[in-house]
Image (tube, helix red, strand yellow):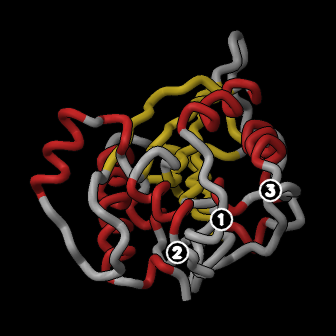
Amino acid sequence: MTWFDTKNGQRLLNLEEEVLSEFLEDKFGYFALQTNTNGRNLLKKTRMKHHIMLDGKDKNLLCLLDQLPFESDSIDLTICQHVIEKNEDNLGLLNELFRITIPEGRVVIFSFNPFSFAGLRNLTFFDGKFPWNSKFISMGDTQKKLKECGFSIEQGKLIDYQLLFSDAYNYSKHLDDVGARWLPLLGNIYFIVAKKEVPGITPIRPKWNKMKAVKAVTNK
């Protein structure tokens, strides 16, 4: 069990799913990867043909994040929801994601902002549950690492200005209105869309039927 199983955690996951659904409306492709689920399959709403799940009840592939068993330039979209907080080698992870992403493909990241109510709880409350027992990395630092790996930042925004000190559902529209207008950099969650841009390169899709893991990565 993690904090995301609480009422407030579920509220936050609902908000992230809304933001992601809006982004995915006009996105097409062949192969979509979700690294973890927090109990939710976020690929169900994509228009990608093949869904690869590394976690949850729909899991169809077992592998390490720093050793993804895909050919270079083969994945159209990867969703990383709250992976950055608990991964020890984020630069290595992002380099691996850059390798497997097709030119013009995208990586989506949701993570906690350390400069927020969530960050304050992370620093001052003793809690052994994820994510409060993990290390929060700022949006700026994550964007910097993405650029070091070769990505460009297509979107970046902060969302949710609610108090997260309680696990109960305690939404206040007033807090969101005030935060978004006057304290926009203090949102609890940041949402980043990173795009792999390789000048002069036309993506050539690998022959997936030659890969050993093909049976594990195609939907039934």
Residue bearing mark 1: 134
Mark 2 or mark 3, which is nearer to you? 3
- Kindly report the distance in space between the C-alpha atoms of the residues bearing marks 1 and 2: 15 Å
Side of 34 relative to 169 (left or right): right
- 171 shown above or below 138: below
- Kindly report the distance in space between the C-alpha atoms of the residues bearing marks 2 and 3: 19 Å
Q: Quadrant of residue 194?
A: top right
Q: Quadrant of the N terminus?
A: bottom right
- Out of 1 and 50, give the one closest to the viewer: 1
- Out of 66 and 50, give the one closest to the viewer: 66
User: Which residue shows up at 21% across the image and 33% down it?
Assistant: 182
For the residue labelled by badge 2, is the local secondary structure a helix, a strand or a loop?
A: loop
Residue bearing mark 2: 38
Residue bearing mark 3: 88
Residue lying farthest bottom? 1
Residue type at tag 2: Asn
Side of 186 relative to 148 (left or right): left
Q: Is residue 103 visible?
A: no
Would you call the spot at circle 2 few (<14 residues within 10 Å), some (14-19), or many (20 or more)?
some
Would you call the spot at circle 3 few (<14 residues within 10 Å), some (14-19), or many (20 or more)?
few
- Kindly report the distance in space between the C-alpha atoms of the residues bearing marks 3 and 1: 10 Å
